[in-house]
Image (tube, helix red, strand yellow):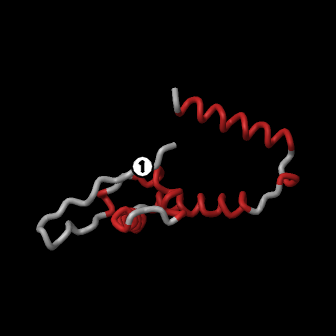
Amino acid sequence: MRPVRLPRLPLLHARRPKPIDGHDITCRQVVGLVTDYLDGNLTPGEHALFEAHLSECEDCTEHVKQIQVTVAIAGSLRDEDVDSLAREDLINLYRRWRTDLHA
């Protein structure tokens, strides 16, 4: 999946940027940017928009927390911790998702 890039913030005046509002970014955009957010790959403006949205949206805040927990748990798994049938199911699920994504 390609990272979602947000449009640059418009300036109201040459010296003053528009105040950041959590509604300037949608929940769908937040979901698309979670990985970049957690990896620290957002621009300062994108990061500010992301944080503003999280401060106003409990659902997105919960989603980010769930992703953080998932990454922490998955990062601690070793190959021998995952049953071979479960691993194959996950691989097939991922392949179907990728196929649907590019269809």
The answer to whether residue 56 is seen in the rendering is no
Question: Residue lying farthest left?
Answer: 13
State the SS at label 1. loop
Relative horizontal placement of residue 82, taking residue 74 as reference (left or right): right
Which residue is located at x 59 percent, y 58 percent?
Answer: 67
Q: Which residue position holds label 1? A: 4
Picture quarter containing residue 66? bottom right
Name the amino acid, label 1.
Val
Q: Relative to residue 103, is residue 98 depicted above or below? A: below
Looking at the picture, does residue 101 appear above or below residue 42? above
Number of marks in the rendered image: 1
Q: Residue 63 at what x, y percent from top left?
A: 53, 57
Q: Residues within 10 Å of mark 1 (few under 14, many from 20)?
A: some
Residue located farthest toward the bottom when viewing the structure as drawn? 15
Q: Is residue 101 visible?
A: yes
Query: Where does residue 73 sit, x and y in percent of width and height?
Result: 72, 61
Nearer-the-camera pick, 20 or 36 = 36
Residue 98 screen position, x and y as percent: 59, 35
Rendering quarter of residue 55: bottom left
Q: Residue at x 37, y 62 (%)?
A: 46
Q: Residue at x 88, y 53 (%)?
A: 80
Q: Nearer the viewer, residue 28 or 58?
A: 28
Residue drawn at x 53%, y 60% as measured from the top left: 64
